[in-house]
Amino acid sequence: MRSLAALLAAALLLACGGREQPDDQGLHDAIKQRRAGAEVTFDGTVAGPPQQVGGHEHLAVTTPLGDRLEVDHNTSLAPSVPAREGDRVVVHGELYVDPGQVGVHCTHAHTSSGCPYPGWIELGGNYYE
């Protein structure tokens, strides 16, 4: 009986994708409350061409609620995201709030010393982590 329950739970996770679902309102609230360090998952549209800055790829992303964030994706820990302006992405990572800028980092599966949990970027059904 236990085996059947475990199998059903695994099947349910696979059916749901097994990943966090976008919560744009949760992200919006975290930004308004300036909750740096919050774990967030959101969807949005790439608002400009990606920029390579050192070992990071920077994506400007606008959410359906109008929040604009910089997504800092560490390409030394995860593959580059082949995003283009206008592409829809889903991002899972850690919110940061700097003076004049809000963004998300820790979008890689291999956590580093400053990232408490793994993150990812989804583009076109592919995960970059």
Image (cartoon, rainbow, N blue to C red):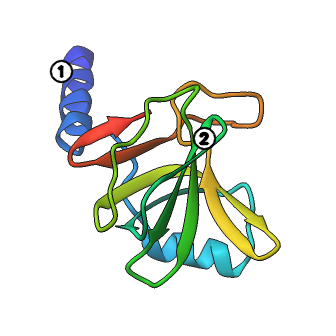
Residue 96 horizontal side relative to residue 110, left or right: right
Going 54% across and 32% down the picture, which residue do you hit? 75
Quadrant of the snapshot with the C terminus: top left
Look at the numbered disc 1 and give the secondary structure of its residue: helix
Q: Residues within 10 Å of mark 1 (few under 14, many from 20)?
A: few
Look at the numbered disc 2 and give the secondary structure of its residue: strand
Quadrant of the snapshot with the N terminus: top left
* Rendered image quadrant of residue 55: top right
Residue 24 appears at what percent x and percent y? 44, 72
Going 69% across and 28% down the picture, which residue do you hit? 112
For residue 29, above or below residue 92: below
| Real-space Cα separation, disc 1 to disc 2, in angstroms | 44 Å
Residue 50 appears at what percent x and percent y? 46, 54
For residue 5, above or below residue 105: above
Identify which amino acid the numbered label 1 is placed on.
Leu
Nearest-to-viewer mark from 1 and 2: 2
Q: Residues within 10 Å of mark 2 (few under 14, many from 20)?
A: some
Instruction: Mark 1 or mark 2: name the one nearer the start of the chain.
Output: 1
Q: Farthest residue to the right: give it.
A: 99
Residue 119 appears at what percent x and percent y? 51, 40
Q: Which mark is residue 46?
A: none
Identify which amino acid the numbered label 2 is placed on.
His
Residue 102 horizontal side relative to residue 22, left or right: right
Residue 6 appears at what percent x and percent y? 27, 23
Going 46% across and 67% down the picture, which residue do you hit? 61
Tell me, yes or no, whether the two marked residues, 1 and 2, touch with CB atoms within 8 Å. no
Q: Which mark is residue 4?
A: 1
Residue 113 horizontal side relative to residue 23, left or right: right
* Rendered image quadrant of residue 30: bottom right
**What residue is shown with label 2?**
56
